[in-house]
Image: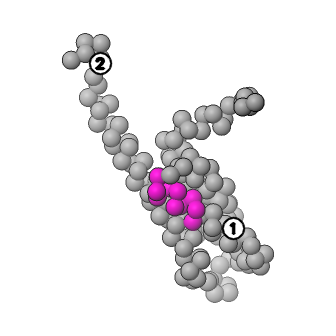
Amino acid sequence: MNPNATENPQEKTSKPICRYITIILRTLLGLLFVMTGLMYFLHMMPQPKPGEMPAGAEAFSGALMTTGYMMPLIMGTQLLAGLLLVSNSFVPLALTIIAPIIVGIITFHAFLAPSGLVMAIVVLIIELYLAWAYRNAFRPMLAFRARHGC
């Protein structure tokens, strides 16, 4: 036994719990975005009937659909980020890619369709927790004066 090593029994039990929570939340968030993306591309997403959503939400959603490229871009990004999260590949990149979409989801529900705000906030909390869990990967990106490689 190493006499210089200090053992903290609480540290031993809290690390694995934190690890499992991170794995579970990463997988759940990934599955949510994979399913949403797949449902869109497989045309399984139910289209709301006119008047079912508030007028502003309906107009905004209609405008995104009318562009012809915006919804496939958003849903493709969700699908890609979700696959990365589920497969535990490039997780910090996936969290960075999905962050603006989560901001869009939050603002959509905060200003246009408040009925889905609770779920949007849960997704935001999971995103923030995962960003904190992977914070060491973000440190170089957040350097005030980054050095170039040349």
56 magenta-colored: no
x, y (%) of residue 82?
53, 61
Q: Amino acid at mark 1?
A: Leu
View extreme (front): residue: 150
Q: Which disc is residue 6 wearing?
A: 2
Q: Residues within 10 Å of mark 2 (few under 14, many from 20)?
A: few
Residue at which label 1 appears:
73
86 magenta-colored: yes
- Position of residue 60 relative to residue 91, above or below, is below
Q: Judging from the image, what secondary structure is the residue with disc 1 in?
A: helix
The part of the image, by quadrant, that contains residue 3 is top left
x, y (%) of residue 138?
59, 38
View extreme (bottom): residue: 49
Q: How many marks?
A: 2
**Residue nearest the viewer, comparing 65 with 50:** 65
x, y (%) of residue 7?
27, 22
Q: Amino acid at mark 2?
A: Thr
**Which residue is located at x 61 percent, y 56 percent?**
98
The segment highlighted magenta reads 79-88
Q: Which disc is residue 143 wearing?
A: none
x, y (%) of residue 132?
52, 41
Is 102 on the left-hand or right-hand side of 29? right
The part of the image, by quadrant, that contains residue 74 is bottom right
**Which residue is located at x 74 percent, y 73 percent?**
69
Q: Judging from the image, what secondary structure is the residue with disc 2 in?
A: loop
Tell me the mark number nearer the camera, choosing from 1 and 2. Answer: 1
Quarter occupied by the N terminus? top left
View extreme (left): residue: 1
CA distance for labels 1 and 2: 52 Å
Q: Is residue 26 visible?
A: yes
The part of the image, by quadrant, that contains residue 58 is bottom right
